[in-house]
Image (cartoon, rainbow, N blue to C red):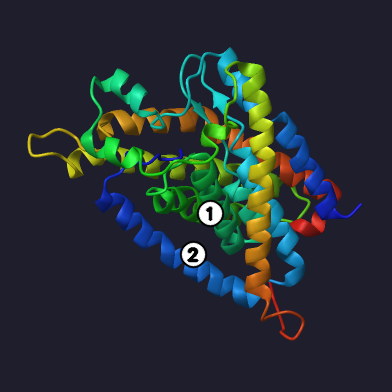
Amino acid sequence: MTTPKKLWISIGIMVLLSPLGVIVPAWFGAEGAWGEWGLNEVEKIMGFVPAGMKRLAELWKAPLPAYAVPGQRTGLLAESLGYVLTGIIGVAITAGAMYSLSKLLTRRNNSDRSDKD
Amino acid sequence: MHIPDGYLGPATYGTLYAVTVPFWAAASWKLNRTLKAKQAPFLAIGAAFSFVIMMFNIPIIGGTTGHATGATLIAILLGPWAALIAVSVALIIQAVLFGDGGITAIGANCFNMAVAGVFSGYAVYRLIAGRAGVLSRRRRIAGAAAAYVSLNVSALLTAVQFGVQPLLERSADGQPLYSPFPLSIALPAMAIEHLLVFGFIEAAVTALVIKYFQKNDPEMLG
């Protein structure tokens, strides 16, 4: 098997295992990353939401916020399935974008150059 | 470590865009001259790896979570310029599609995890690995140490950017406008968790993957 193929299988396995990134924190009662709270949580911690934060936080509505699919139910099973699904989408788009960008960057310099790494 | 929209004021996020864009330009310039078409699949895999490794949130019991970024590992395998772009692409997709990290904070997050994360990790790796053979244990140790340093550099920068907001951005009546947490809270909170836990996760992942390549595909470490 070629190296890229083997590595793609590894990435696939990682995507399938990615719900561990939701389940394990839930088991240990960990609440998400420091400094990545939503406006409600900031209000709970501070007792108020800073004015500029409120304005900027609502600037962009991500299509698949927090790696969840639209209409996803609550609970670890639904979250895990949503995580795998959005993980597949994210990996595909990230790899596609990086591949296209690499092709764009290399279109001028293929075999006709003396290349070095 | 993905700073959301609203935590950084315009002075900070503007500055960090202005700092990061030249690195993207330099990386493109560099790759335009050195990258070979047959390496494109490996860059795609590198970006995908960075995307997916960041989904593995690791908990601190009763506390917060953190994750590895893959920045050092990708820099070791593909070189720092390719890694800078690969991690940036992952971070941009995370922000735009999944709201993981803010749109205004793309410059900041890419500076912290892609630019600083990659170059600090790569520098430590080169320094420790020296002329050690591709199959040597020293390469793994170098990778682990580099990954540990790299993630902590990223976390430190993130904490400083959070922590200076109450100093930089205040309303007329002295209320913080953006991240309200001062350096005295942000710095220890971010530093301790990365120094004690997440840095070691990044180190372990990096060393294990280097070991995998040493065993199965040593030319990847060439």
At 60% from the left and 56% from the top, the residue drawn is B86
B21 left or right of A98 in image = left
Front-lying residue, B154 or A66? A66
Disc number at residue B24?
2
Residue with the mark numbered 1: B88
Quick check: can you spot residue B38?
Answer: yes
User: Residue farthest to the bottom?
Assistant: A112
Quadrant of the drawing holding the C terminus of chain B: bottom right
Q: Amino acid at mark 1?
A: Ser
Determine whether the residue tagged by mark 2 lies in a helix, strand or loop. Answer: helix
Determine whether the residue tagged by mark 1 lies in a helix, strand or loop. Answer: helix
Q: Tell me where residue B16 appears, x and y as whole percent.
A: 35, 55
Q: Are marks 1 and 2 in contact (CB under 8 Å)?
A: yes
Q: Tell me where residue B150 appears, x and y as whole percent.
A: 51, 46
At 55% from the left and 49% from the top, the residue drawn is B93
B23 left or right of A86 in image = left
